[in-house]
Amino acid sequence: MYSLLFRLVLARFDPEFAHHAGMVVVRVLGVAPFSWIARALTRPSPGDEVTALGLTFPTPFGIAAGFDKNAVGVRGLSALGLGHVEVGTITALPQPGNPRPRLFRLIPDRAVVNRMGFNNAGAEAAEKRLWKLRRRRPSAVIGVNIGKSRVVAVEDATADYVASAVRLAPLADYLAINVSSPNTPGLRGLQAVETLAPLLRAVKAAAGSTPLLVKIAPDLPDDEVTAIARLAVEEQLDGLIATNTTIARDGLVTDPAKVAAAGDGGLSGAPLKQRSLEVLRLVRAAVPADFCVISVGGVETGAEVRERLAAGATLVQGYTAFLYRGPLWARQIRAGLRRG
């Protein structure tokens, strides 16, 4: 039903407009009585639970950062059966992001190109929303993904991340440092070990007892992936998220003219599957067994979630396939996991 609706209706709309319209529906599903109906259809069973980061996740599958940038849809996403919702990326300062259009579908590849540029209302606004969420106690675990404010120079990035961490860590179940988006100039340079180490150290001190993870890019060479994974362990982080979107365009079946018209930005969706799986295996080989590794990139089915878990993922996230699968995607994932 949803796939037909997508082909006939949703695919005709501007992708960013369609996303905002979808978020309206998600927010409605977070309010009774609609939330009761959604939970009845999607509620995970007790056997789906995963313990990680000192937390109990209702299911190993959650939504990646980027879907709910301002922490406005957590209750609805929780009602749809997602075990955790990673909100953001949130920056210390509010910012509008890059000029539109900045979101493009590559439908034959079941992929998306985005150059959103961390558009969000800022850490202060997120802090207020998270306070309200905490009072309502959604069933999903809430992760908070933080990034560098665009107007802040790269050399001042640490203080900028710390400012967000001080506000948001007390309200987060876990905090994720995003140094891997391709859409903020200079950001990926922070992944260099000599630059990353003091940043991780400072944010960990600011985060206090809140579990801290770092999110890396799939475009790093294998040796750098391993080096960052080992660094995360050395700096006593609680986990690592692999991976963000890619700047590569290899192997796409979409008309090259359409790919070129989309321009720069991060590619997500099915084409990222293989590299994301490779990075997961590299990370898992470099860290202790009890170190949390969240795998994200190209995941669409329950079988693919099982594959990530078998390859060493503690938890798995998705995003792009929500656009192609619709609001019952988490239910489909759950059914696929049980068939395994």
Image: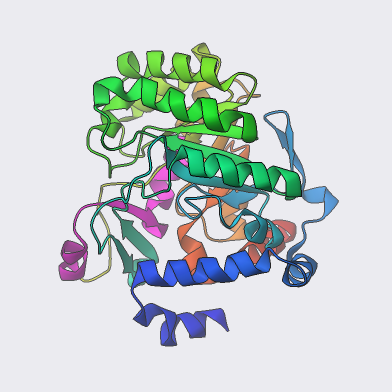
Residue visible at 61% across and 26% down? 211
Residue 187 can be seen in this image: yes
Is 339 located above or below residue 245 in the figure?
Answer: below
Question: Quadrant location of residue 174?
Answer: top right
Work out which quarter of the rendered image holds the N terminus and state it: bottom right
Question: Residue 102, image x and y in percent?
Answer: 27, 60
Viewer-nearest residue: 310 or 137: 137
Is 306 located above or below residue 313 in the figure?
Answer: below
- Residue 156 on the magenta span: no
Task: Name the side, left or right, on which 155 lies relative to 146.
Answer: left
As drawn, the residue found furthest toward the right would be: 46
Q: How many labels does the image show?
A: 0
Colour scheme of the rendered structure: rainbow
Question: Residue 30, image x and y in percent?
Answer: 68, 63
Is 270 located above or below residue 220 in the figure?
Answer: below
Question: Residue 244, image x and y in percent?
Answer: 40, 43
- Range shown magenta: 256-280
Residue visible at 76% across and 68% down? 32
